[in-house]
Image (cartoon, rainbow, N blue to C red):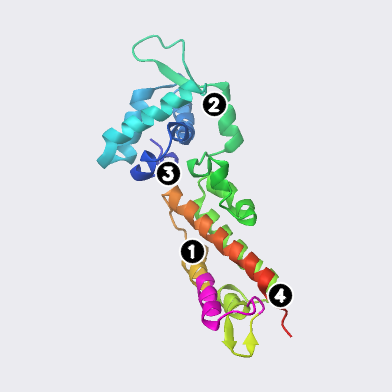
Amino acid sequence: MNAENLRFLPPIDSLRATSASEIGRMLLPIIREQTRVNAHGFVARDLARAIATSKYRTDQDEAGRLIMEGLSSLERSGLLVENPFQMMGSPWYTLSRSGNAALQTSGMYSGAVASEESRRLLHPSIADEALGDFERGRYDVAVNLAFRRLEIAVREASGLNEHGRDLFIAAMGVRGKSERQPLTPEPIDSSEAVAIRELFCGAYGAFRNPSAHRRIDYTDESQVFRLLITASALMYILDELCSAAAPLS
């Protein structure tokens, strides 16, 4: 079982909360791997057992049943079909034309972004920048790009040339009663302005800087999607700051 493809499956708690159809689509890259290894296809219960014992060792019984639900959903939707030439024992399955098309269309499927409702949580610029890499399992790249996009947006909105934390300090908050930064709305309490600035500094330092300097092996796609939502929330706050900031005299 290829560990790279198993990373598309969430932890057991998230798997419990995932619909059978979404579990099925998460399994498509694994199924593609199996059909490449064996042109005849696979036995559903054997595949479910292999995934459960490899990915969910302490919860393998429950995970195996959930994975079988996903495989059954794929069969009902026509993405899996039986191989008519495997007549012995349990039925063997392979991807249908629709199943192959689904893989080619979406790449490495990600259940966390299956619905339009989930996608709407992302700021359009964050979705454009990071969603493609997220769907392909390039989680560290997706997080890096999302927070880099935020930094670029702050730089463009403020007209400053600083980078990283220095940029946020120069662009936001207040230094004194008579000295405001470009993205400080007026009127605003000074402590509130500083808190907003530190929110940006802290998120950038925690999530952009580490991924820029070393590879971070994210294994939980739900965690990564939450980070994309965090970057999106900050981007929406930036939009509000840009609308509310008074021109500097």
Q: Look at discs 3 and 1 and give the one toward the viewer.
A: 1
**Circle 2 residue:** 99
Q: Is residue 183 magenta?
A: yes
The mark nearer the N terminus, 2 or 4, is 2
Q: Which numbered disc covers residue 207?
A: 1
Q: CA distance from mark 4 to mark 3?
A: 40 Å
Q: CA distance from mark 4 to mark 1?
A: 24 Å
Q: Which numbered disc covers residue 122?
A: none
Q: CA distance from mark 2 to mark 1?
A: 36 Å
Q: Residue 221 location, x and y as percent? A: 45, 48
Crowding near pointer 2: few (<14 within 10 Å), some, many (20+)? many
Residue contact at pointers 4 and 3, CB within 8 angstroms: no
Residue contact at pointers 2 and 3, CB within 8 angstroms: no
In the rendered structure, which segment of residues is drawn in magenta? 182-200
The mark nearer the N terminus, 4 or 1, is 4
Q: CA distance from mark 2 to mark 3?
A: 20 Å
- Position of residue 29 relative to residue 200, above or below, is above
Q: Which numbered disc covers residue 159?
A: 4
Crowding near pointer 1: few (<14 within 10 Å), some, many (20+)? some
